[in-house]
Structure formats: C-alpha cells, structure tokens
Image (spheres, rainbow, N blue to C red):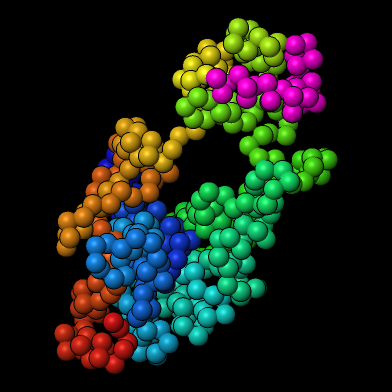
Amino acid sequence: MQENRELLKGLTVISLEQALSMPYCTYRLALKGASVTRIEALQGDPNRYVGFPLGDEQAMNSQFLCVNAGKQSVSLNLADERGQKLLREIVEKMSVDIFCTNQLPKNYSKLGISYEILSSIKPDIIWVGLSGFGPEKSEPAYDPIIQAMAGIMDVTGEPDRDPLMTGVPIADLEAGNQAYSAIMEALYKRAITGKGSRIDISMFQCAAALLSTKITNFEFGEPAGRNGNRHRLFAPVNTYPTEDGYVIIAAGNDRQWALFVANHEFAELNKQEYSTNKGRIEDIERLEMILRSITSSMKTEQVIKICKDSGIPVAKVATLNEIMADPDMRKSMSRAKDPVSGYEITLPIDPVAQPSGKGMVHFPPRLGEHNEEVMMKFLGYSAEEIKELRETNVIS
C-alpha cells in the first residue's frame, strides 16, 4: 500500500555507516520513505568490496548492494576538520531528523559526530550509536564474535559437535532491527514532547536478549548446550528426512500425537508409553529413530499431508532457490534497477511490508555519487569549491 511505503516521508536521515548492522536499519527506514544519505569515508564502506561484483565495476559488490538500496552516498574525510565542518553544515542545512552511526564509540568526538556536537546544532535530533558493546566498551565486534560471546553459538548445532553460528548474521540483523524500533519510539517521543533523543544500541545486548526462553528455563534446570533441531520440552519436534528432502514436524500436544499415530503409516509409534509428551521425551532417541526410518521412505508431500490432516504443524525445509521462486514471497520482494548498467537486483524483504510488496527502489548508490547534489542543493557550494574539496581529499 502506498501509505505504508511513505510512512516516513519527509524525514531526513544521515548515517555514518558501514558493514551490515546500521545499513540494515537505515535500509528499513528508506523502504518506509525516509530520505537516507549515507556518509562514507573516502575509500568507501568495506562491504563495497565484499562478495560478487556488479560487472567489472569496483566498489559495487553484492554484500554492499543487499542493504543499501534507496539511499544516497556522500563521501567525507572526517579526519579533516573541513570534512567535519561539512557534516555540521549538512546536519544544519538539511535539517536532519535522525543521525545514525556504527563507528566505535571512542571515535565519536574525534570524528565530530558525538551526540553533544550534533545536538548543539539540531537540538531535537534523534542520535543513534550502534556498536558492539555500547559506549562504555569501545571494542570492535563482528557478527560471529557477538554470536559467540552472547551464547547464541552455545545453543546452536548438534549435541557433542562444534558450536555453530546461525545461518544468517543474526547479531547484525537483530541490532539493526532494534535500532529501527528504538528510532520509532524516539520519533513518538519527539512528536509528543518536541525533544530529541540519544540512543545507544549494543549488539551484544541485542543478541543476548534472544536467549529469552533459554535463560528462564536454564534457571529451572534445562540443560545447557546444543540440541540440534530438537525441542527439549516437546516431542517430536525435529527435522526428518524424506525420499526427496526434509520436513520439520512439531507435535505440540498429546491430542495431535494421537491423531498422527492413528495413521497406518505411523502405527508402529502408536504405543501407550508414547501417549504423553513426558513419555515421548523420556524415550526420544528410540522414538526419533523409528520416525526417521518411516519418513525416509516417504515423499515429502505425503508426510506433509498426513501431518496436516492430523492437525500437526509441519513444513518442508525449503531451499533458497525455492524461496526465490515462491510466488507469494516474490510479491513481498522489492527490486532495484541500475540506471547505468541496466542490471536488476532483488532486495531483502521488508519484514512488515504489505503483501503487494514494495515495487522498485532506487539502486544502491555509488561511492560519493551524491556529493555534488547535496553540496550544491543544500549547502550552496559552487562547482569550483567542490572541485577544490576533491583535490584536497576532503571528498572523493
């Protein structure tokens, strides 16, 4: 729906961002209509050089493209006082609503981006600093490090095997989601009080918060460690092989189980000792050995039909190819077309988009692509002044 796409239209966001966590947050803002300008160092975001290239072009690789559509790019040398002056002018003359960064906290003042500096220019600014551990601990952090430190890896993987990371960079993405959520709260606060906010987001804290059920259950005696795809408290809940793939089955109560084993294909499991969840949990190894043996001789769709007819939640373990080809999923996907090369890319789904999707989004920007536009339109710089800034390495 159009109103969903333009929910944040009129808001101006400036983000000194790189890598994934903060760019994912501002990508979500851009999808809702906010005007997002990313500030980059002269060499650009390191993710511009990671992944698969856009043709023969440099600094436009797939790891960058995935979460930077719908934005502008201005390159500034913030190690130079003239670059910091330009940033202050941008904040003032573009009347910036939200400033975001995922620089190390120890660099906030050095780069001229601290809350104190920018709020002195724009008192109602919403300032968001996303870092590994918050402002009290200025250490670099990447998604795998946070997953390890926050306990995510300890609970991911098979028992008696090496701990694993999740299949997606969940610490980065969750921190971006929480930054987005905090910005929504700050916008509401500003609408009521007229006051800005300082928001500090810790990737570590965001990741640790995902242990919500684990922490309480641990206090009640749940064993620590990895459990594969199996649920510790309900059975059977796991992935099971079929002739042509995998399914995940989740029996949530004894009534569902009774209906399930009433099917002749699973009659071998129709035992009194398995009639309660407690009994199934106590003999889970034997139960799952039998269940795997049965499903492995059946087609995926046959298992799914039996489960659905029995009221048991079930799903095929879909491949990425299948997700990309799913017509319902594609309705929610956005695309961006490069006006230079004509190449089109599929973009990450907006988690709360309407089923009709987002349509076309502006292609991710090239490094410094909007230097002239921003500096001429908003700051009043001449072409000669911009040329001098470029020649003296204030911009690229």
Q: Is residue 7 above or below residue 332?
A: below
Front residue of 391/120: it is 391
Q: Overall secondary structure of the magenta stretch?
A: helix
Q: Is residue 132 left or right of residue 65?
A: right
> Where, quadrant-wise, is the C terminus in this rendering?
bottom left
Residue at 43% in and 68% down: 18
Q: Is residue 175 magenta?
A: no
On the question of residue 214 being in view, the answer is no
Q: Which residues are magenta?
A: 271-297
Q: Is residue 295 magenta?
A: yes
Does residue 228 lie above or below 394 as drawn?
A: above
Where the N terminus falls, by quadrant? top left
Please tell me which residue is depicted at 57% across the width and 49% down the height of the picture. 166
Count of picture labels: 0
Judge by depth and name the residue closer to the eye, 33 or 53.
Answer: 53
Q: Is residue 324 left or right of residue 224?
A: left
Asked if residue 156 can be seen in this view, the reply is yes
| Observer-nearest of 96 and 247 | 247
The percent coordinates of residue 120 (x first, y second) are: 46, 79
Residue 265 on image: x %, y %: 59, 11
| Residue 21 pos. (x, y %) | 48, 61
Left or right placement of residue 173 versus residue 206 in this view: left
Please give the name of the residue rendered at 46% of the width and 75% of the height, measured from the top-left corner: 119
The percent position of residue 61, horizontal first and vertical second, equals 33, 63
Left or right position of 394 against 166: left
User: Could you tell me which residue is drawn at 45 percent across and 66 percent down?
Assistant: 19
